[in-house]
Amino acid sequence: MTSVDDALGRVWPAELRTDRLHLRPVTAEDASLVRELLTDAEVRAYLGGPASQERVAARQAAYPATAGAWTVVRVADDQTVGLVTIGPDHRCEGRGGAHSQQQAQGRRAQGERQSSHGAGVKRFAPRRARAPLA
């Protein structure tokens, strides 16, 4: 089985695009986004709370050089809306993990909800109208 690091090393740097989102590697210009997300109590509520200033500085320095660290950009208005990282899960040898953080500001106003999915994974998805069951 290929390790997560080996797999990322073969394709990194990579960009992913959908009709709604663009995931691009984190750059030094994303430092303010990293700080905002890591220090926001609502965003970090289930991730151990806001990060210390030392941890924020370390992440700001490390993310641009980290394979598997993407900035999430909304295509419609080219607005940065979060971070996604994929890498080895330090809690379980050989198992990959994913982690996502989205800006809390305006999330509810945009009709989005928060839910958790799996250990250490936080996912945000738009509310969708559901057809009544017949």
Image (spheres, grey):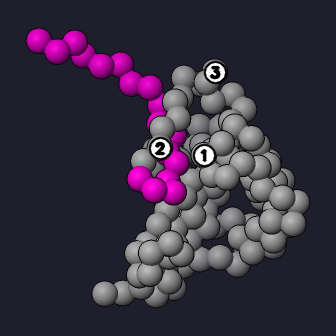
Mark 3–mark 1 Cα distance, whole angstroms, equals 21 Å
SS under mark 1 = loop
The residue located at (68%, 46%) in the rendering is 44
Give the percent coordinates (x, y) of residue 92. Answer: 45, 75
SS under mark 2 = strand
Q: Which residue is mark 3?
A: 109
Mark 3–mark 2 Cα distance, whole angstroms, equals 20 Å
Select label 3 or label 2 by which is in front: 2
The residue located at (35%, 19%) in the rendering is 129
- Side of 105 relative to 96 (left or right): right
Q: Quadrant of the C terminus?
A: top left
Mark 3 or 2, nearer chain start: 3
Q: Which residue is mark 1?
A: 46
- Side of 97 relative to 2 (left or right): right
Q: Which residue is mark 2?
A: 116
SS under mark 3 = loop
Mark 1 or 2, nearer chain start: 1
Mark 2 nearby-residue class (10 Å; few <14, some 14–19, many ≥20): few
| Residue 24 visible (yes or no) | no
Residue 31, quarter of picture: bottom right
**Residue span colored magenta:** 118-134
For residue 76, above or below residue 118: above
The residue located at (69%, 65%) in the rendering is 26
